[in-house]
Image (cartoon, rainbow, N blue to C red):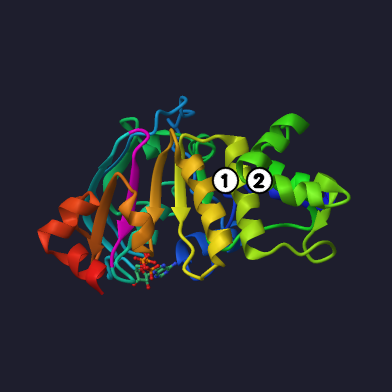
Amino acid sequence: AGVFVQPLQKIAAVIETYPKGIAGFRRYLELLATEPDIADAPHARPAPPLSGAVRFEGVGFGYDPARPVLRDLTLDVRPGETLALVGPSGAGKTTALALLPRFYEPAAGRITVDGIDLRDLTLDSLRRQIGIVSQDVFLFGGTLRENIAYGRLDATEAEIRASADLARLGPLIDSLPLGLDTIVGERGVTLSGGQKQRVAIARVFLRNPPILILDEATSALDTETEREIQAALDRLAEGRTTLIIAHRLATVRHADRIAVLEGGRLAEIGNHAELAARGGLYARLAAA
Ligand code: ATP
């Protein structure tokens, strides 16, 4: 497995997982192989430990400059707040959140963390403070331990175990004769979708970033697994600024606030009760 760990170190601090069907994040690993990272500005400095205030200020962006995907998007997320992004398919939810770890750059406006323009920070120091859990989890051929510690190769055994327990992987690990030394992936034990997702959650617990991006699963897990994962994610979100690309209204209801995107613009923002009462797009989506 050592052979695989080395090239992965580059991205280890960057991204836990990459989703299927979500262009921005999915393409990231492909891009890594072919294109250089967005370069640090000459004046870029390492990010201080962030409290997790995130602000989009009049952000405009299009993959093709002639076809804007985000238009004048302004969002203010308080440290520790959970904000769910909802909206029709193609509204720009994923794209908006792909700009936060700077997979892409805004064409207009700016994004700040703790009041600092992202472009003033080194990419690596920014990405170290953003955790991502997405629907399709990337596991490499290696042990469960290596897969969890991916992103924090200096982690101690106790830290790895604690993160696994927080992600509710404890019973799985205890059921395996080799425990954390179990090889997973193609040449080892195949993990279920729910188990893989818990590995991704354990990775983020271990790295403990102040900002979390959750790309909610669209495909159904069984109810029991779903509950377990939701409980682990709720715990993971505690004390972190959490931005959710939401597909299910059940999750959204628990968010501190919900931002409704439509055609790359912010259509409405508020909590569930406020938006439901407003009778706008959210109320229509909720009724559908
Ligand atoms: P969904 O709920 O379906 O995931 P979304 O609100 O997350 O939708 P985005 O995935 O951000 O929407 O897509 C917004 C628009 O940008 C869509 O028109 C999409 O086709 C386009 N798009 C997304 N990713 C890319 C990409 N890597 N290259 C070109 N266009 C893209």
| Residue at the front extreme of this rendering | 224
Name the spot of residue 138 as percent of width and height, x first.
65, 59
User: Which residue is at 44% across, 38% downward?
Assistant: 41
Per the rendering, the mark at residue 10 is 2
- Above or below — where is 65 with respect to 142? below
Quarter of the image where one finds residue 211: top left
Q: Tell me, yes or no, whether the two marked residues, 2 and 1, touch with CB atoms within 8 Å.
A: yes
Name the spot of residue 23 as percent of width and height, x first.
47, 67
Q: Is residue 288 magenta?
A: no
User: Which residue is at 50% across, 52% downward?
Assistant: 230
* Numbered disc in front, either 2 or 1: 1
What is the quadrant of the C terminus in the image?
bottom left
**Label 1 CA crowd tier, 10 Å (few <14, some 14–19, many 20+):** many
Who is closer to the viewer here, 267 or 169? 169
User: Which SS class for mark 2?
Assistant: helix
Q: Which residue is mark 1?
A: 14
Is 254 displayed left or right of 187 in the figure? left
Quarter of the image where one finds residue 31: bottom right
Question: What range of the chain is rendered magenta?
Answer: 79-87
Name the spot of residue 29 as percent of width and height, x first.
59, 59
- Above or below — where is 132 with respect to 162? below
User: Which residue is at 77% across, 32% downward?
Assistant: 157
Q: Is residue 85 magenta?
A: yes
